[in-house]
Amino acid sequence: MSELSVNHLLGIKYLTKQDIELIFETADQFKEVINRPIKKVPSLRDITIANLFFENSTRTKLSFELAEKRLSADVINFSASQSSVKKGETLIDTVNNILSMKVDMVVMRHPNPGAGVFLSKHVNASIINAGDGAHEHPTQALLDSYSIREKLGSVKGKNVVIVGDILHSRVALSNIYALQLQGANVMVCGPKTLLPKYIKDLGVKVETNLKKALEWCDVANMLRVQNERMDISYFPSTREYTQQFGVNKELLDSLDKEIVIMHPGPINRGVEITSDVADSKQAIILNQVENGVAVRMAVIYLLASKIKQ
Amino acid sequence: MSQKVLLNSKEVNITLHRLACQLIENHDDFSETVLIGIQPRGKFLADRLAQMLTTDYKIKNIQLGYLDITFFRDDFRRGDKPLEANTTIIDFIVEDKNVVFIDDVLYTGRSIRSALTAIQSFGRPKNVELLTLIDRRFSRHLPIQPNYKGRQVDAIDNQKVKVKWVENEGEDAVYLIDK
């Protein structure tokens, strides 16, 4: 099957296992392209893509923009803080105004869950969800799985623990869906206050002791505490969070095997992860970023191929 | 669906030897030359020729690579056929080298046009030549011709030329198939 089963990338929950394999095989070729002297291919030179970021971003925004430019697409960037959204313009109006300028694809990050799904029903463009509130962040989960596949050969059968603020994390949910679709065993670990009440219904193991979780896993994906999404206090202090759920070199060295450390970024050094772990050879954090460009190129290319001339 | 044998195993072998000799005539010890198989089907021919040049003609250090042209095609989003990319492996310098593209069948010439654009991503070759096992003449959409050709074939649009290799399909042969 050489085509995606979807016309938008709104969440991992809408993808099949074959979709993920196709994205990874295509990303393999784009990873080679971005290591050439001339890192561009002309495939999307007649496509215009709008990046609509209603929330702050460093990695995702740059990564998408770079992926689009490497595919030779025309790119326009929209940042909510500098736009007429401040004057009260609605989401649909904002997007339709942009689409009137003949934009084919929209990459959107929005604070409201389901914003991408809502948009896909009201506008005539291909939508990629770059993060919708605490719901999904599909391209992050794809690049995370791709990085595990690169480091360990495959995702199937691997034990992956996601550590930290699961409650507010779109990265966690998308990763849970993606990893399970590929046959990995998934565990979530964090303070009880940051573990959703019915998380077990997703078929994941739950652990509140970090050492036990790390002893079980092959890969640990460390999440940042999402302070900006917290309306109340979920733990007594950052120091206490770090003592119980932060990973450090001593803890890693005490395990009887070498595990892979991941982090979607941005890192709060000294909170969920210490510098000596983040900069160690066990951490594949910067590989994740490099793979992010290749995976996003694959997603954009495959979705664009469904927009007929 | 009927098929006719254009080249049998023995004829393929003789043709490959002739093509190898023609390459040696022009490229001597291949120190300034790189061979590039166009994915997906040029790879087998390129492998076979490189093997022949090394084993039978004792040419040392043949530089062989594979180029996938999927992202440089001119029919992206125009057809119903989904496109699947293959691997590109070019782990040598192309700048200022003699490049020989190797493909099994030259038909419209669009694949080679794509390859000419794609190779620029790796550097500026000194010159580029084309070696093809089968040249379907009178079928060209672009002004592109082979420098080395195995056999010239007159085929109409509803016919397909299929090259089979022992490594892949269990035999070396070229068939003309009515679709």
Image: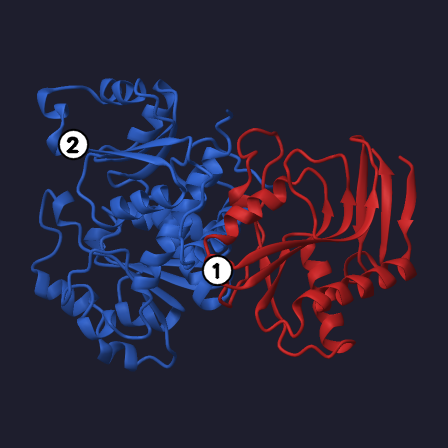
Specify whether residue B6 is in view.
yes
Asked if the residues shown at circle 2 and circle 1 are in contact, with their CB atoms under 8 angstroms apart, the answer is no
Q: Which structural element holds mark 2?
A: helix
Q: Where is residue A162 in the image (x, y as percent from the top left)?
A: 32, 58
Q: Mark 2 = which residue?
A: A80
Quarter of the image where one finds residue A278: bottom left
Label 1 marks a residue whose chain is A
- In the rendered image of the structure, the colour used to display chain A is blue
In the rendered image, the vertical position of residue B63 relative to residue A8, given as above or below: below
Residue B137 x %, y %? 77, 39
- Residue B171 visible (yes or no): no
Q: Which mark is residue A166?
A: none
Q: Which residue sits at x=23%, y=17%?
A: A93
Three-letter amino acid code at the position of disc 2: Ala
Q: Mark 2 — on which chain does it sit?
A: A
Mark 1: amino acid: Val
Q: Where is residue B104 in the image (x, y as percent from the top left)?
A: 73, 51
From the image, which quarter does the N terminus of chain A lie in?
top right
Image height check: is B27 above or below B107?
below
Judging by the rendered image, the residue that carries numbered circle 1 is: A155
A189 vs A19, left or right, is left
Assess disc 1: are there few (<14), some (14-19) or many (≥20) residues with their C-alpha within 10 Å of its C-alpha. Answer: many
Foreground residue, A39 or A77? A39
Left/right placement of residue A269 relative to residue A205 reads left
Q: Circle 1 sits in a helix, a strand or a loop, which is it?
A: loop
Q: Which of marks 2 and 1 is nearer the N terminus?
A: 2
Give the letter of the red chain.
B
Instruction: Report the mark closest to the observer, 2 or 1.
Output: 2
